[in-house]
Structures are given as C-alpha cells and as structure tokens.
Image (cartoon, rainbow, N blue to C red):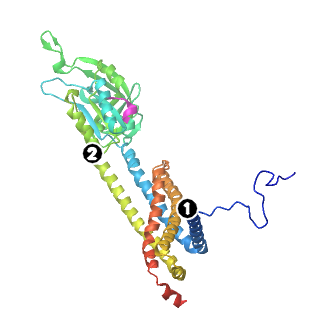
Amino acid sequence: MKMVKGHEAGGVEPHESGEGLPASPEPGPAANHAGRSMGNTRMFLLMLFGAVFRRRSRALMAVVASTVGAATLFCLAAVCLTVPAQMNQEMRAYGANLVVAPIERADQAKSDIAPAMVDHTSEMVAVKGPARQASYRYENVRVNSASHLMAGISPAQVRALNQHWNVEGDWPSSGKLMVGRDLAESLGLKLGSTLQVRYLKNDDQGQQVAGRWSKDQVIGQASYQVGGIVETGGAEDDIIYARLVDLEALTKVRRGTDVIEYSSSAVGADLTAIAQAINEMTSMGVHAQTVTKISSADTRIITMLQTLFWLISLVVLALTLVGVGTTLASIVAQRRSEIGLRKALGASAGSLALEFYVESGIYGLLGGLLGTGIGYGFAYWLCKAVFGRALAFNYWLALGSVLLSIAIAIIGSIQPVSRASRIDPALVLSQE
C-alpha cells in the first residue's frame, strides 16, 4: 500500500531537526494534578496490597477474629429476632389468650353472639395479627335425670386452638360425643359406651298446660356413642362435647354463640388494645377479656429470652472488639520499623492512619462476609433442631452484620493506629 506523505496530504513537511513539526501541547495544571492523584492512588493500593499479603498470617488472624465475631453475632441476632415469633406461635397452641362473651344484663334474657357479630369481632382481633378462634354454644342437657353442660363446637377449630388437650379416642363426629374425664368417670362411661341425652325446656321457658307449668317437657333426645374422653385438668373435664349441628338437632333451635375464644399472635400491649377496642364499642353487645395466665406468660418468657440473647450479643461484641484490636496492635508493632522509615521519608500521620484503617476495613469485610454465612448456617441449624422450622435468610440483617464487622475492625484499630502515629522515626531508626 502506498503511503501518503504528509506534504502530499496538505500537512506540514517533516524535518529531521524537528522544525516544522506541530508543537506538542504542554500538560496543564489539571492534567498534572490528575496524574499525581492516579500515581498516589496506585502507590497507596500497592502499599496496601503489600501490607496485607506480606503478613498473611497476621492478616489471617484478623480475618478469623472478625469471622468468629460476625458469625456469633449474626447467629444470636437471627435467633433473637426469630425465637419470639416461634415461641409465640408455639404458645398459641396452648389455648386462648382472649375470650369474648355477650354482655349479660339482669333485666334481659340470656343473649348470644350472632354470626355476623362473630365475623365483625374476628376482624377486629385480626387487625393486630393472625389469630385462631373457636366458638362454643353451651346448653344444659339431662343424662340420667341429672343436668350436665353440653358444648356444641366445631371440632377442627377447638382442636387447632387447644392442641394441649389430652384426648383418648376421637374428637366429636356424627353420632359420637367427646366426654370430659371427670364426667366420664362419674357416669361410668368408657370409649364405645352409649349415652342417652335429653334436652328439656327450663321451667321459665315452659308452656302452661291446663293452668299448670309443663316441666320437664322433652324438646329432643338422642343416643350417642362415646367416641372420645378429654382430659385437660380444668373445667373441660366436666363437659360433654358434640358437633354444633348435633346440638342444634337435639335442641331444635339454631342460635348464636355463647363464647368465642381467640388465640391471637398479638401479645402484651397489643392484645390489651384489642380487648379495649372491643369493649369500647358497647353497641356490639360483647365483652372481651384477656386470659392473663396465658398472655402474661407469653410476654414474660419472650422478654426473658430476648434480654438473654441481647446480653450475650453485647458480651460477644466486646470480645470481638478486643480480639480484633489485639490482632491489629500486633500488626502495628510488627510494622514499627516500616512506619518509622516512612515517617522519616515524609509520610504524614494522616496517610499512615488512612492506610491502617482501610486495611482494618478489608479484614472486617472479609470476616463479615464469611462470618455472616457461617452464622446463618448455625442459626438455621438451631431453628431446625429446636423448633423444627426453617429460617429464612434476612438480607438486611446480613448487611448489618457485614457493616458492623467493618466498623468493629476500624474501631478496634483506633488505639494501635494512634500509637503508630506517635512513633518517633529517629528513635526507631537508631534502634535498627
């Protein structure tokens, strides 16, 4: 290919002496400043790289210290944030913590809670969090001429709410009842026994026949098989449980609920707020009351666990700070001669401090990443082993763990760096 000469192209003809060539532009102050900055940055990174990799054993110790601290703190924090929710969920299987009943007035007949009001109450309870519920309708029935309490329930609801009930046999089903342990023993009932139940009108609800009250008027009667015997150690041991549809068939009456029991995930002040909100709406005709023995136990146990975990976290945080600080102090002591030489060559205390802080931050970053992964593994194993549930990875907690590890590493290096900045170069060099 034929090359086109400069003069042929209309340019300036080159000359051996350089005359005629366009003068190269002199670099301006900005270019000089940028060049020096790039050079300083490159030099800083090279020195930082050398400091980290020339002393790999010391650097590894600092990273290990940060890793242990980050792993322990992440594991404790993850468990501390998860355990209250897990404990609350476990406690919800041990009965209701909120009971709602209709307001009884002396001048009015026995009232109940209509289905629409049950739904409205449940919506108010669910405002503070999910809740399980069970509705009960109670009637007095006769067994062998003796009056006993019979509850019409939804077995699925009551079973989910009271998982601590000790049931021998089956829960109520079509044609089968569940009888409390004390009542079964007093009546001599066993699994498979037949129970004749009658529902009678009360005296004040009876009809006059030939000017006389018709007492013991049988409204309904049926034979049931004892399918299960329940033992709770409470008042439930004296009650007969049947499906609500069976009780309605026996009484020939469909009406509302007598009691609604809730097992709400809300605890403490939130649970009290729910009860107050329901009680303030007097037009609802219901009264809500917290079950103190359950709600207080929830709050106390969860508070104790959280306090314990946070105290342990503070101790681990202090130990991590000491460990990282000690490791960095040894690194500074090892580099004492180098620091003296660099100060003698004009390095400022600020530049030396910046190098040490960045170096500490790198150790904290590496330790934080490794420790967070290891800590999540331990927390996952703990939740799986103790609660039988998986632990979701909390990205915000992981970010906080890494940032905290960097901060601890930098804070732990403050004292060693402060001592390094006070090194007298003449004294150090004279000792070499």
Find residue 55 and report its horizontal and vertical position in percent: 58, 75
Residue 37, compared with residue 289, is above or below; it is below
**Viewer-proximal residue, 224 or 112?**
112
Name the secondary structure under disc 1. helix
Residue 373, compared with residue 298, is above or below; it is below
**Viewer-proximal residue, 42 or 401?**
42
Q: What is the three-letter code of the residue carrying label 1?
A: Ala
**Viewer-proximal residue, 124 or 237?**
124
Residue 124, compared with residue 59, is above or below; it is above
Give the quarter of the figure containing the C terminus: bottom right
Q: Residue furthest top?
A: 210
Q: Which mark is residue 30?
A: 1
Q: Residue at x 32, y 48 (%)?
A: 298
Q: Does residue 156 show up magenta in the picture? A: yes
Q: Would you identify the image quadrant in which residue 270 lies?
A: top left
Figure label count: 2
The reply, left or right, for residue 371 in relation to residue 279 is right
Q: What is the three-letter code of the residue carrying label 2?
A: Ala
The reply, left or right, for residue 381 in relation to residue 280 is right
Find residue 393 and report its horizontal and vertical position in percent: 50, 50
Q: Residues within 10 Å of mark 2 (few under 14, many from 20)?
A: few
Whether residue 7 is visible to the viewer of this picture, yes or no, is yes
Whether residue 186 is visible to the viewer of this picture, yes or no, is no
Q: Find disc 2 in the rendering and name its residue.
A: 269
Mark toward the start of the polypeptide (1 vs 2): 1
Find residue 130 and report its horizontal and vertical position in percent: 37, 38
Region rendered in magenta: 152-158
Q: CA distance from mark 1 to mark 2?
A: 64 Å
Q: Residue at x 27, y 48 (%)?
A: 296
The reply, left or right, for residue 167 in relation to residue 256 is right
